[in-house]
Each structure stands twice: as C-alpha cells, then as structure tokens.
Image (spheres, coloured by chain):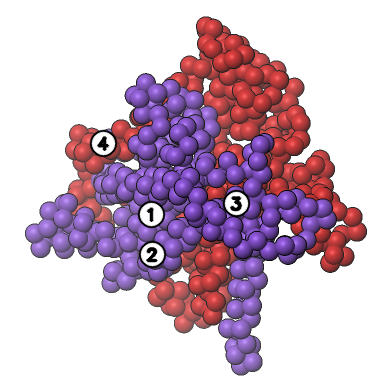
Amino acid sequence: MTLTRRLRPYYLSLIGLAITLVFVSPYAVMLLDALRPSGDVLASPPTFLPREWQWNTFGTVLSDARFLNWLRTSLVVAVSSTAIVLVAAVPAAYFTARFRFPGRTAFLLVVLVTQMFSPTSLVVGLYREFFDLTLVNTYLSIIITNAAFNLAFAIWILQGFFSSIPRDVEEAAHLDGCGRVRTLWHVMLPLTLPGLVTTVIFTFIAAWNEYVVALTLMQDDDKKPLTVGINSYVTGYQQHWDELFAASLIAVVPVVVLFALIEKHLVGGLTAGSVK
Amino acid sequence: MTDQLDTPVGAAGTPAAPTAPARRRRRRETGHASALSAVPWLIVPLLLIAGVVVYPAIALVQASLSDYSITGLRKGSAGFDNYTSIFQHDDLWTVLANTAVWVVVVVALTILIGLALAQFMAKDFRGRTLMRWAIIIPWAASLVITSRLFTLILDYEHGILNRLLVNLHLLGEPIDFLGDDSWVMPSMIGVGVFVSLPFTAYVLLAGLNAIPGDIVEAARVDGASPWKIYRHITLPLLRPALLVASVLNLIYVFNSFPVIYTLNDRNPGFSHDTSITYSYKLAFKAAERSVGMSAAMGVVNVLLILVVVLIYLRIIRWREVTQA
C-alpha cells in the first residue's frame, strides 16, 4: 500500500507522458516533414528522420509576405469573432438562465438548430447574400459568419454557468443597490469566468480553423486566412510540403499561447467556491 | 415540466442548493419576464442567426426545388424532382449506412475515451501541464491540414505508419489504410476520434472541475468506494457536461467534412462517403454535377441530424437542454 502510494505520482507521470506522445506524434511527423526537402516527403521507402536536414523552412515561411498577410487575417477574424460572440451571448445566456418568458424554449431550440446546419451546405446561399451586400472579400463577412456559427455553443455553455450561480448571490448585490447590468458585470461575470474562458477558447479555435466559408468568401490572395492560404503551398502545380507543414505548425502557436494564458481559469471551479 | 425547469442544473454540473418550498415560490416570482422585455437581451443573437443561418437556409431550400444547368445556372422550378432523384440514387443507402457507422462509432468512442482522458487530466502529477498542452494541439491545428497529414502518414507506399508497424514486426505486410475497402472507414474513424477528443475532453474536464470537492470528500469520509463515488456522485453531476459534449459531437461529427473528404479523396464513387461529402460531391465532383440534388441532400442532412438529436434528447430527457 505504502509502496503503491509512493509510486503513484511516477506512474501517473508515465501515463501522462504516453498520452502526450499519442497526441503529439502526428505533429512530430509534421515537424520532421517540415525539416526535409519537399521531394523527401513522398519518398519511398519513407524514413523517420529527414535524409537531409533543411533548417531554413520556418525562416522561409516567416519571411513570406503572403504568409504574414494570411496570419494577420486569421488573427483579426478570430479575435473579432470571439469578441462578437461574447457580446451577443453573455446577455442572452444570462437572461434565459434567469427568466422564464414566452418564447424562451423556442429561442433556445432555434439556437440549437442553427448549430445543425453544416456550413458546407449554407455556403452557396451565404455567398449570394454577401455578394448582394457587396461584402464578398471583406473581413466583416467571415467575422459575422464565424460569430453566428459559434453563438449556439456559447449561449448554451454560458447559460449553464449562469443558472448554476445561486440566486442569493445576485439578490445580495441587488440589496446593495446594484442594477441588473451592474450585477451582471461585477458579480455574475467574475463567477462565470470558467464558462467565459471556455467560450473564448472554443470560439477562437473554431474561427481560427474555419475553412469552407473563408474559402468561398475570400478570393483576394492577401485577404485569405491561414487555413485557406497555406493550401497554395501544395497544389497541382507546385508541391512545397515542407512549407505547408512549417506554416501549419506556426499556425498552431497562437492557439496554444492563448490557451496557456487562460487555461488556469478553466481549472478554476470558481462557482463552487461562491456557494456557502 | 415546472419542476424540471425550475431546478437549475448548470452545464458546469453544479447542482442548485436544496430548495425549500417557500424559496422556490419566491424564485418563480422573480424569474418571470415578458417576451418584450427579453428582446434587448436576445436581439444580437437573433439578428446574427437570421442573417447568417436563416437566410442562406431559405436559399438552400429554394435551390433544392430548382432545376439547374450543368454549369450551375438556374433554369426554373423542379418541384420535388431533386428529392426524387436523391431517393432513387443507387448509392444513397450505402451513404446513409456509412453515415450511421461514422457518427455512432466516432461519437461513442470519443465520449468514452474523452471521459477517461478528462478524469486523468483532472489528476495532479508532474507533467500534467505538458500533457494538457499536447492534447490541445489536434484541436488547434487546422482540420484540413491534419487530414492531409494523415493521408501521408497512412499512405500505403510513403506512409510512416506502415513502415513503423512493419519494422516493429506488428505487421508482415503494409496495409493500404486508405485504399483497402475494409480499412478506409476504420482509418477515417481513427482520425475522426483523434481530432474530436481534445474538444470533448475539455468540455468534460470543465464539468469535472465544477463538481464541488466537498461533496466528493463527504462521500469519501462516509466510506464510499471510488467506484461508488464515481457512479453515484461524479457521473450524475457530470450529466450536463456529458449532454453538451455528446450533442455537440453528434452535430460536429455528422457535419464533419475535411476528414472524410481528404482521406477518401483517391477512392472513386461514393462507397466510403457520408451524407455530407455526398451532397458536396453531387454538386462539384461526381457525374451528376447537380446543384439542385446537392441542395436537396443538404436539406435532407439538416433534417437527419435534427431527428437524430431530437431522438437522442428524448432518450435522455430533453428538458434539461433548455435548462442546462
């Protein structure tokens, strides 16, 4: 018993390491492919390590003006979409969590149903709509689209967090003279921080990786987001697998950084602390 | 109805404090509002949904009732001809069977493995942060690129996985993961689960984190076994998070496009397609080249997933969704 207890942290770490390897290994292959000349990627028989190390791929990609344009688009789109989702979802989630009103169930079901439409099947209609509004090839078009497609998740998650906060907390704030909006801002939002963080991560990643809509709506090469733009490294005409993979790995970095910055709030469980 | 709706159970899994009858009554009084007063709180989502989902959805339905030339020009109304063509198509049943296998197996495996993974992620050990960062990578990476990566890894001739398995003597002969009819679906399912796990594990982890530690602690003090605690305390409190994870996975996996489209790219016909890639190919890739049929299949797809989710919610008591 004492022995297993002493060993426990080590074997947990070992299992953790194994899990880490499972999730990382495909991307380790990607890294190795980024560090070999493109022709080597499709060599037969394949080798684990590059036959010839090509260290400058990441430098080449980072100094590619097109890549930097795509990166900027992705950042602008993901940040703006996330902001819009928060602004739209927080009030709706709060209100539906706290009040029964005619149409409440209908609203929540409509929100859920919007999530069921595959962007692939809506993209033709979206293109026509944005074309009529002369918004094709604008950041705004894909920002709005990403925001709308991610609303359902945000409202759903946040509503759960809001309804898990005891009403007493809010009533105490009311008695102290806080208005509805101030209570929401100063009392409820800090308590739903894990929910907000979850929403931010999910929306940011979804917008960061959105492909089909951006592929259709963004036709100017310098306005494409990364997901669409980097595919031009490997086409029927040219095959730069090394650059495609280097660019893809760089594209992962902002997400992991965002995640590292806010992850500890995800762990929080702040709601539990407020219930006494 | 009322009881269910008035017991707040958060998606985070925190149950409401026990409610005395008197308090419950007061709760209901403060909790009522008119539809009009809801408008300012809901207007932004409603506008976004109307503009970005409802409008193109109407366009989709219109397209499904129209006749198009091979180049995509609308020639006029087609009535229900597109739907008739869809239902008389030889491959429809293959595609629907593929879809059922794909959705059920990927979602079930994702939830089961995700549950174990989340449980493990909640433990404290050296290297936990590293593991959590590693798990986020498949989610952070573009699905299109990950799919292209796996076409290389799983390749019969150039693929590193076959090389590895043969070198380790786990395989005598390489397997044609993406070409052999009996391996295409399992390979796609493997990749599908791999890319769905991070999202699922994090939803479930958030749910686990929201379970108050003192409830579990109290059960432990009372002498409950770990399995009993898990079965009777953790799982019930995790229900809302499980609900979110499973419903969203059902939808995402059903609508999943890049994995199937990319991994199955070299195979002709529809024998490994799901209904989403099928509807895309009908318009852009297959012999049909029919925008109308593709749109009709798009409408059928939405109805399919809607029915699947409603059945699922019915099974697990849907009222919690509008609450949680």
The residue identified by callout 4 is: B43
Question: Which one is in front in this view, the residue at disc 1 or the one at disc 3?
Answer: 3
Q: CA distance from mark 2 to mark 1?
A: 9 Å
Query: What numbered label is drawn on residue A262?
Result: 2
Q: Is residue B317 visible?
A: no
Q: Quadrant of residue B33?
A: top left
Q: Label 4 marks which chain's residue?
A: B
Q: Label 3 marks which chain's residue?
A: A
Question: Which one is in front in this view, the residue at disc 3 or the one at disc 2?
Answer: 3
Which element is circle 1 on? helix
- Where does the image place residue B114, in percent across and percent down from the top left? 58, 59
Q: CA distance from mark 4 to mark 2?
A: 29 Å
Question: CB of mark 2 within 8 Å of CB of mark 1?
Answer: yes
Chain letter matching colour red = B
First in sequence: mark 2 vs mark 1 = 1
Which element is circle 4 on? helix
Q: CA distance from mark 1 to mark 4?
A: 21 Å
Q: Is residue B85 visible?
A: yes
Q: CA distance from mark 1 to mark 3?
A: 29 Å
Query: What numbered label is drawn on residue A243?
Result: 3
First in sequence: mark 1 vs mark 3 = 1
Instruction: Please tell me which residue is depicted at 66% across the width and 44% down the height of the picture.
Output: A239
Shade of chain A as shown in the rendered figure: purple
Q: Label 1 marks which chain's residue?
A: A
The residue identified by callout 1 is: A200
Q: Amino acid at mark 4?
A: Ile
Question: CB of mark 1 within 8 Å of CB of mark 3?
Answer: no
